[in-house]
Image (cartoon, helix red, strand yellow):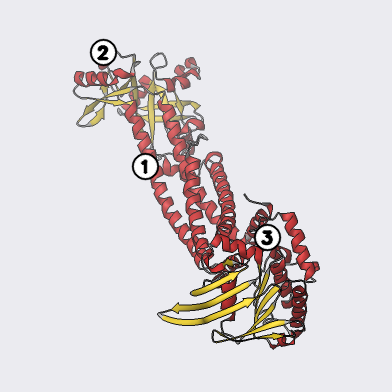
Amino acid sequence: MLNNLFLHFVSLFFLKDKRRYLSLMIISTVVVFLLSVALFISSSIKHTLIENLQNQPDFIVQKVVAGESSYTPLSWQDKILDIPGIGSINARVYGRYNLDSKKSILIIGIDPFDEQTNKSLKEIIDSIDLKAFLKEKYMIIGAGVDSYLKSHFFNDYYNFLTPKGELKRVKVFKVLSPKSAIFSNDVAILPINLAKEILGIKKDSVSDFAIDIPNSSEEDTIKQKIESLFFNARVVSKRSVREAYESLYDYKSGIFLALFIVVLTTFTLILYLRYTIATSIERREIGIFRAVGWSIKDVIKLKFLENLALVVVSFTLGVSLAYLYTFIFNAPIALNIFLDKQNLKSFATLDAYIEPGVLASIFIIFAISFLATALIPIWKIATTDPKEAMR
Amino acid sequence: MILEVENLDKIYKSNGDSYHILKDINLKIKEGELTILKGVSGSGKSTLLSIISGMEKPTSGKVELLGEPIAKLPDIHISHFRASKIGMVFQHFNLIENISAIDNVMLPLVPLKIGLKEGREMALEALKLVNIEHLGKRDIKYLSGGEKQRVAIARAIVVKPKVLLCDEPTANLDLVNSKKFIELIERLNGNGLTALIATHDPIFDALSIKNKVVTISQGKIEKEELKNG
């Protein structure tokens, strides 16, 4: 049990060495901050993408020519729909359009009257006045596209050049909220036929088909049937997309973790040097404690509590600052490392989501290495002759 | 008998060489006795005091303090024993500079699990005994050499030890403070405290009370004599 005299000395020695502890606390806070930012961003993006994936179709089917995806004949739709077990099939039209030599946007064509339109787009469609949207050549654009157009003096429209050499003037109907920018930053949603014209897709073709399968146990069988029906079909399942997302962001946070280990090792070395070389005063103090009757356990207990206080303060500060930086200030600079190569200025915002266990992992990684580095040299001093230590 | 040392030897080994610091030491001290361990620098007095206090282990021989085989006790017991039964005063005071006098005096009370309030009272009482209770809140770094010495004594007596061990206590004091120290020791010894003082300072020849002088030279006890007996 810790009595109040012992706690008096813990606080007394902690405050006595406040300058030394302050410098250590600053370094520790930076280390915790870096690790927390990396893990917060990766877990937030992964969470958002996987949440969104719930609204995506179970399968995507597209035609492959020479190993590359190509436009898919619309005639496939009925044949696929004949396969038992398929709930719905939705023809999708999309493709990249180059605004200039470096910037491109993703054009998505929608048929607002097609009930099979996928759920995530349906939310957008439900929020607009369809009558007005279809009245003229309109588009709904993401925040990044809006920013690009405005910077090029297209305040409320853009002139798309079709493969036939025609200019299509399309007006901006609505700008999507930056909240959805992780998905919609570089997106322009247009009526399906207009999108086909701009992308050069024939009227009897689409980009791919989105398929929903109510009974998930039939997924593998249906995949095999589609592949046997069309020798040149590629079938991508939601499961494989999910795995790709997970491995991508695990990989990115893994790189950060590796970098963090390098930082932590350096930090540990600094701490080790600080405790083994720059501690003549502390050595003497420990010698005095031992000379007046403190046991090795008493000394370790005092130093453990002093350093634990430092660990807790640094951890709390580091994590709080990382939370502010990541979720309130939207992780400037760091976010771009985690998102795919952005060709338009990113307006993506992060959902304040922290994976359960992430905080505990940060604390364990940091606290164990810190306390071990701090306490091993203390233990070494405490076990030498007090007379020797006091010299 | 408070202290019994029998056939004690201490050999240091360094870089393959051996240094025989204490040779066949035999010493007995009775309760309430004031013993002066005299000898020049390097004669082995400080090493003998360190072994008696349990801070160092002998190479061979027996040390019994208050009936406990101090050299054979495990760390946790020896530390508790030192905290509760032995008071130590060092040549360089060995106080913690950046904390107050009263906090320094309270240090030995931690292993005895004494509470903060009671600890403060005990420390104030010890400071009062050495006449510096008014300096309790002052940091050690702002005290003079004589005042530091008194804080060191207060720390040594705060637990009301059975034995007081002093290692060259006047080496860093001027004549006035050295005399004050002697008066203090005489007073504490008069109250029944057993004391063993290792010194080469001739000022201890002028002690007015009964004491035993043990002369040590090149690690061996040369003679023992009673004074004012």
Q: Look at the numbered disc 3 and give the secondary structure of its residue.
A: helix
* Front tag of 1 and 3: 3
Q: Look at the numbered disc 1 and give the secondary structure of its residue.
A: helix
Q: Mark 1 points at which residue?
A: A251
Discs 2, 3: same chain: no
Residue A103 percent coordinates (x, y): 39, 39
Q: Mark 3 points at which residue?
A: B109
Residue A106 percent coordinates (x, y): 38, 31
Q: Is residue A362 or residue B98 the one in the foreground?
A: B98
Q: Look at the numbered disc 2 and give the secondary structure of its residue.
A: loop
What is the CA distance from the residue labelled 2 to the residue labelled 1?
38 Å
Res B164 → quadrant: bottom right
Q: Mark 1, chain letter?
A: A
Residue A69 percent coordinates (x, y): 26, 29
Apparent side of residue A208 relative to residue B122 in the rendered image (left or right): left
Discs 2, 1: same chain: yes
**Three-letter code for the amino acid on which mark 1 is drawn:** Tyr
What mark, if any, has residue A83 been given in the picture? 2
What is the CA distance from the residue labelled 1 to the residue labelled 3?
55 Å
Marks 2 & 3, CB-CB < 8 Å contact: no
Judge whether A63 appears above or below B40 on screen: above
Q: Mark 1 or mark 2, which is nearer the start of the sequence?
A: 2
Judge whether A285 appears above or below A261 on screen: below
Q: Which residue is drawn at 54% across and 87% down?
A: B218
* Front tag of 2 and 1: 1
**Three-letter code for the amino acid on which mark 3 is drawn:** Leu
Q: How crowded is mark 3: few (under 14 residues within 10 Å), some or many (20 or more)?
A: many
Q: Which residue is drawn at 72% across and 77% down?
A: B145
**Three-letter code for the amino acid on which mark 2 is drawn:** Ile
Discs 1, 3: same chain: no
Q: Is residue A390 or residue A86 the one in the foreground?
A: A390
